[in-house]
């Protein structure tokens, strides 16, 4: 590369990734094939529209490519339709809102500190200014049980046009059937934001909301699904010509979504990223992806137990998916930002996080959030989880001792280098 500055930064990032362990539950390491599809000449092409209905010429390869990605996504998730163009999870969610809602309409979504995502109506977002978000929560944060009675009460009182499930910091499964029956009572669109667990659904170790009557699933493609940084919208309904505006009914949701993504929100799709999505979907359809998905869950359950044994207070008491949320302020009298920084210094990367109804602010919250998708990709198994828990507790207890922290960093580096990044493998 002629640009030595960028080249050096890429090299430095490769070293950082190789010498440490990625515990942020929304991150992963992609394969060499996904990486090379992302770096392909499809980045040179404009292709506004959809396969067979584009505004520019020269689409003989992009049309086939995008259709392939669509077909693979539909197969993985049992969807009638897939839109593979959203640039990421946030625009995917916005596209669904604008496909279905009018300004001022109501959405019933999970409380943000109880696990919901920023794009589920955090007051600072554009969608929160356009639409009216109301909240349900957990009934019991020691088990993670959602308050479905309250959810129903709110649904009957406010008649939301969308009931949204999904999360970025909730370590348990939803009871989709209960939510679906409430939504059907009031005729709401049932939407699941599965960004975190798409790979677990693909691997058959988490429930698929479509099996319970949900109408729309949004996702990112770069978390447990292990593809490029990007978004995805799956839906059930009839797919018709996106050039014609259909009536706003549930059966037309696939076409309403297509029109909302383009021309509603985005311009030219990123076909190089769509190429990488197609490769990731191919990988998710292989039998070994099921083994990967199960190992993520087994590793998370094992790590959760080892952390509990070492005095970590786990929100919801444990995990049923890939992630763990722990109240470190209560466990160690240190805030999440301090712990994140200490663990970063020894090569363990995770993130500070609010806990339900946190009394501390988001930039210095009570919790940390960690998970196993990336370390499982790297090849770590249950036997390695005790070591990670032990490094964490040693670093936290010795957070003011640079000599001990340096020693721990050396141990983590030595260990991590035994597990190459998948993009290193030819
Ligand atoms: N930033 C993602 C996460 O970490 O959960 C969600 O957008």
Image (cartoon, grey):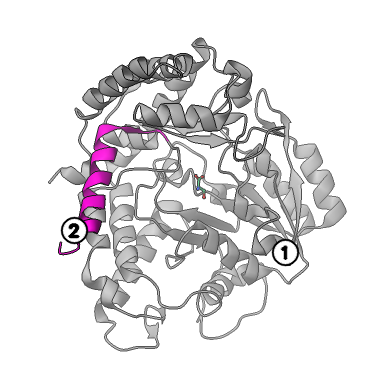
Instruction: Look at the image and tell me whether residue 217 can be seen.
Output: yes
Above or below, 182 against 125 in this view is above
Image coords of residue 204 (percent x, y): 42, 40
* Secondary structure mostly taken by the magenta-highlighted segment of the chain: helix
Chain-order first, disc 1 or disc 2: 2
346 drawn magenta: no
Q: Residue furthest left?
A: 426
Q: Residue furthest right?
A: 157
Looking at this view, is 363 or 129 the one in front? 363
Mark 1 vs mark 2: give the one in front: 2
Judging by the rendered image, the residue that carries numbered circle 1 is 129
Instruction: Look at the image and tell me whether residue 368 can be seen.
Output: no
In the rendered structure, find residue 287 and report the number of the disc placed on it. none
Above or below, 194 against 62 in this view is above
Looking at this view, is 244 or 6 the one in front? 6
Tell me the magenta residue range: 1-23
Distance Cα–Cα, label 1 vs label 2 = 43 Å
SS assignment at label 1 = helix
In the rendered structure, find residue 4 and report the number of the disc placed on it. 2
The number of numbered discs placed on residues in the rendered structure image is 2
Image coords of residue 114 (percent x, y): 67, 37
Q: Residue at x 59, y 17 (%)?
A: 331
- Quarter where residue 333 is shown: top right
Q: Residue at x 43, y 68 (%)?
A: 85
SS assignment at label 2 = helix
9 drawn magenta: yes
Q: Residue at x 77, y 65 (%)?
A: 105
CA neighbours of label 2 inside 10 A, class few (<14), some (14 to 19), many (20+): few
């Amino acid at each position: 590369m002629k640009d030595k500055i960028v080249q050096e930064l890429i090299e430095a990032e490769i070293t950082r990734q190789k010498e440490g362990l990625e515990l942020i539950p929304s991150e992963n390491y992609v394969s060499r094939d996904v990486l090379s599809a992302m770096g392909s000449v499809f980045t040179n092409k404009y292709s506004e529209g959809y396969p067979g209905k584009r505004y520019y010429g020269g689409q003989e390869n992009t049309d086939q490519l995008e259709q392939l990605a669509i077909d693979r996504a539909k197969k993985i998730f049992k969807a009638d339709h897939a839109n593979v163009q959203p640039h990421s999870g946030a625009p995917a969610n916005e596209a669904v809102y604008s496909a279905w809602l009018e300004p001022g309409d109501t959405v019933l979504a999970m409380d943000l500190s109880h696990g919901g995502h920023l794009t589920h109506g955090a007051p600072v977002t554009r969608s929160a200014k356009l639409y009216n978000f109301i909240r349900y929560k957990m009934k019991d944060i020691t088990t993670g049980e959602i308050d479905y009675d309250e959810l129903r009460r709110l649904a009957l009182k406010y008649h939301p046009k969308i009931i949204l499930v999904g999360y970025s910091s909730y370590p348990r499964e939803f009871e989709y059937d209960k939510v679906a029956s409430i939504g059907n009572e009031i005729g709401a669109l049932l939407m699941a934001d599965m960004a975190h667990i798409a790979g677990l659904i693909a691997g058959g170790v988490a429930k698929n909301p479509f099996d319970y009557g949900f109408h729309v699933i949004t996702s990112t493609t770069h978390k447990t699904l292990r593809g490029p940084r990007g978004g995805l919208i799956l839906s059930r309904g009839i797919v018709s010509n996106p050039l014609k505006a259909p009536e706003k009914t549930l059966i037309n949701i696939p076409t309403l979504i297509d029109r909302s993504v383009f021309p509603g929100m985005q311009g030219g799709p990123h076909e190089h990223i769509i190429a990488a999505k197609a490769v990731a979907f191919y990988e998710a359809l292989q039998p070994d992806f099921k083994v990967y998905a199960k190992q993520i869950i087994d590793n998370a359950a094992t790590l959760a137990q080892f952390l509990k044994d070492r005095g970590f207070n786990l929100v919801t008491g444990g995990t049923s998916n890939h992630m763990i949320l722990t109240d470190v302020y209560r466990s160690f009298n240190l805030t999440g930002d301090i712990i994140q920084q200490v663990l970063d210094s020894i090569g363990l990367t995770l993130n500070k996080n609010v806990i339900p109804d946190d009394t501390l602010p988001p930039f210095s919250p009570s919790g940390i959030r960690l998970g196993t998708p990336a370390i499982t990709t790297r090849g770590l198994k249950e036997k390695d989880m005790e070591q990670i828990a032990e490094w964490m507790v040693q670093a936290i207890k010795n957070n003011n001792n640079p000599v001990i922290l340096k020693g721990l960093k050396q141990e983590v580096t030595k260990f991590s280098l035994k597990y190459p990044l998948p993009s290193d493998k030819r």
